[in-house]
Image (cartoon, rainbow, N blue to C red):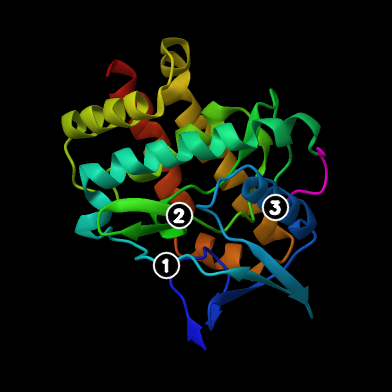
Amino acid sequence: MEILSGGGINEVVKIGDSVRRPAGPWSANVHALLRHLRAAGFTNAPEVRSTADGYEFLSYLPGDVSNYPLTPAAESVTALTSAAKLLRAYHDATVPFARTAPRDGWQVPARDPVEVICHGDYAPHNCALDGTTVTGVFDFDFAHPGPRLWDIAYAAYRWVPLTTVESDLPATVQAERLRTFCDTYGLDAESRSRLIDTVAARLHALVDVMQTRAAAGDKAFASHLADGHHTIYLTDADYVLAVHRKS
């Protein structure tokens, strides 16, 4: 067995060519999504193999995973553009599923308008890279029905990245990388006009989830609050509004 990096707040273990992860009440919906993706020809996400004793067993996605600080490979322009391409392909593949997907039973509530199934945490720590190219995405625990822009906003926040706390990229470079991400995804002008406000709203929503879950006794989120993760997100929300609304 090998404990894997990535995987967000869960302990993820590789056993042979499978990955064992804790299952939750939302896993049935996630597994239906993953099966739909396979049937639709999207092979860049894990395949469901089985569930047993409170765990799910998924296929292993080969590749490198970056945590923080980001590796040079994850910071590359190739990683940025391939992440945007993969997110677009994923979103497009979920459209038929989203039309009939249940609104309830996800870890994160559905958000209107429902256009796709948001991944919910599309970040370098949940993606596999082959060299500098993003080739896979995993950890769908926070997947939920919602608008494309809600997912794009968080993905851009993580991949550009739009932060002064976890990156020292100048604002001008961030703005150029943000344009590159949006161009590669194919984001329309109207959505771009709302993107920065959506990034800030998405970060505030993340903090709300962290605080709610911690208050309910979730030790992982309580640990994140104790480590000050929420202050990073709130600081970054203020930053993107102050600086990148002008971009």
Q: Counting residues from the N terminus, which is met first, the one under dot 1 or under dot 2?
A: 1
Find out whether the residues at labels 1 and 2 contact each other: C-beta distance under 8 Å: yes
Q: Over which residues does the magenta segment extend?
A: 102-106
Helix, strand or loop for the magenta stretch, by majority: loop
Q: Which residue is mark 1?
A: 62
Q: Counting residues from the N terminus, which is met first, the one under dot 3 or under dot 2?
A: 3
Q: CA distance from mark 3 to mark 2?
A: 15 Å
Q: Is residue 35 magenta?
A: no
Residue for point 48% across, 47% down: 122
Q: Which residue is mark 2?
A: 136
Mark 3 surroundings: few (<14), some (14-19) or many (≥20) residues within 10 A: some
Q: Determine whether the residue tagged by mark 1 lies in a helix, strand or loop.
A: loop
Residue for point 52% across, 49% down: 121
Q: Residue furthest bottom?
A: 1
Q: Counting residues from the N terminus, which is met first, the one under dot 1 or under dot 3?
A: 3
Measuring from the top left, give residue 30's x and y in whole percent. 71, 53
